[in-house]
């Protein structure tokens, strides 16, 4: 039984960050109900085993543009603790499912809104994706090598880090407030805001005069001791030996403990390019696996760079169960971990509408029309 057992969440289904937030809440024990569009007649439901973001959740179908669909969702809202709205500003208002409608139906409701640009501002009505949101916030400008273009860190920084996780934190904070006061509220989680918040330490360094152009700083591949290097087999390894003891260990394993450049060049930014070339030359003499073996048991802030499929079988991660195989699909295990109320994957991803009748019955909500759940394939 996870720490959110008993919490009821209605998720109006969108893409990316909304479903990821739903997955996190479900992993923590919440009863997350996805409201999906009805499956067109004659089209079979696809097997959703690989839909990892839907794991542990239940699915109902409703046409949000119909009076019956709106009535069904409002019925669920009255019995819910949280609603996740993944649409652009104004969409749910036009559907009759906006914050005023839902909070009138349930004054204790936490209404979580997930957008890229936020609910107001010149960009609010525009389309966009992760790359655009982190570009505007300045976060994208931090990613990449010196002299090169900004490199998007896939969609981890905007969609999931700056979006879904901030929505989850906001929803849980508002839920605590609602349970102590009886007052619901709207949580406006914008990826542009969240990705900006993630740059707080970089802004601190900038204010202290300790941050320069992209790719010239300690944490962005400017420093030779905080970087990635290609091994003899084409694989990559990472080093993060910022502190003195770890740097000394790094030099010892590399056979550079007595090298003048390796010793004196560490604190001389003018010599960083030469030191980086020196490290690159040494790392190119062994394979990634050989370096992993050489650094085993050494406190040098070293780790091989595994591809996703390789990481799934990595011994440390395997011992911790960081990746699990459920329903025929290898996927990340729930995080974080709890000593008394462990998180867990509550079940396989649902087929659209699979739990329509079940959810309304369990939540004690009248179904405004015949339940037509899609049968499991």
Image: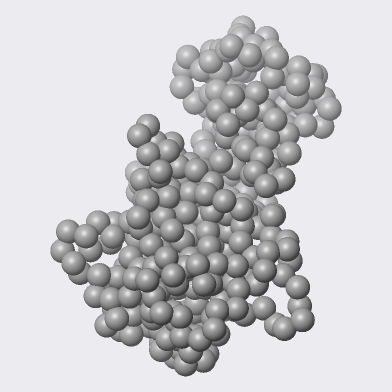
Quarter of image, res 259? top right
Q: At 60% from the left edge and 73% from the top edge, which residue is drawn?
A: 373
The one of 139 and 279 positioned closer to us in this rendering: 139
Left or right: residue 353 versus residue 100 is right
x%, y% of residue 115?
47, 71
Image: 288 above or below 358: above
| Residue at x 65%, y 43% (from the top left corner) | 326
Of the 4 image quadrants, the one containing the C terminus is bottom right
Tell which of 314 and 295 is nearer to you.
314
| Residue situated furthest left in the rendering | 181
Q: In the visual, does 104 lie left or right of 329?
A: left
Residue 327 visible within the image:
yes
Vertical placement of residue 158 versus 127, above or below: above
Residue sitting at x 35%, y 68% = 80
Task: Locate residue 313: give its quadrant.
Answer: top right
Q: Quadrant of residue 279?
A: top right
- Taking the view exactly as shown, the residue that stands out farthest to the top is 258
Task: Specify the quadrant that holds the N terminus.
Answer: top left
Q: Whole-percent x and y of residue 264?
A: 55, 17
Q: Nearer the viewer, residue 44 or 274?
A: 44
Side of 228 relative to 205 (left or right) = right
């Amino acid at each position: 039984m996870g720490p959110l057992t008993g919490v009821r969440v209605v998720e109006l289904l969108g893409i990316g960050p909304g479903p990821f937030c739903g997955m996190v809440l479900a992993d923590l024990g919440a009863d997350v109900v996805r409201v999906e569009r009805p499956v067109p007649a004659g089209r079979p439901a696809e097997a959703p085993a690989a839909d990892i973001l839907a794991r542990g959740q239940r699915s109902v179908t409703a046409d949000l543009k119909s009076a019956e669909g709106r009535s069904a969702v409002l019925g669920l809202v009255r019995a819910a603790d949280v609603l996740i709205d993944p649409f652009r500003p104004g969409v749910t208002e036009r559907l009759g499912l906006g914050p005023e409608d839902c909070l009138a139906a349930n004054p204790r409701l936490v209404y979580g809104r997930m957008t890229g640009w936020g609910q107001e501002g010149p960009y609010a009505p525009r389309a966009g994706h992760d790359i655009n949101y982190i570009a505007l916030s300045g976060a994208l400008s931090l990613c990449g090598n010196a002299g090169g273009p900004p490199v998007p860190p896939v969609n981890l920084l905007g969609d999931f880090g700056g979006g879904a996780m901030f929505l989850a934190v906001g929803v849980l904070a508002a839920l605590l407030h609602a349970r102590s006061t009886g007052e619901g509220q709207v949580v406006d989680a914008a990826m542009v805001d969240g990705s900006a918040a993630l740059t707080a330490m970089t802004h601190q360094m900038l204010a202290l005069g300790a941050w320069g152009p992209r790719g010239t700083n300690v944490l962005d591949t400017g420093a030779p001791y905080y970087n990635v290097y290609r091994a003899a087999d084409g694989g990559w390894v990472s080093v993060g030996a910022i502190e003195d003891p770890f740097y000394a260990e790094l030099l010892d394993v590399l056979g550079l403990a007595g090298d003048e450049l390796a010793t004196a060049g560490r604190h001389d930014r003018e010599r960083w390019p030469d030191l980086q070339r020196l490290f690159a030359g040494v790392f190119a003499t062994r394979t990634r696996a050989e370096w992993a073996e050489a650094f085993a048991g050494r406190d040098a802030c070293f780790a091989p760079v595994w591809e996703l499929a390789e990481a799934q079988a990595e011994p440390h991660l395997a011992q911790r169960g960081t990746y699990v195989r459920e329903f025929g699909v290898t996927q990340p295990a729930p995080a974080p971990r709890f000593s008394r109320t462990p998180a867990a994957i509550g079940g396989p991803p649902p087929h659209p509408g699979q739990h329509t009748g079940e959810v309304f019955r369990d939540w004690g909500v009248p179904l405004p029309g015949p339940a037509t759940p899609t049968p499991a394939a």
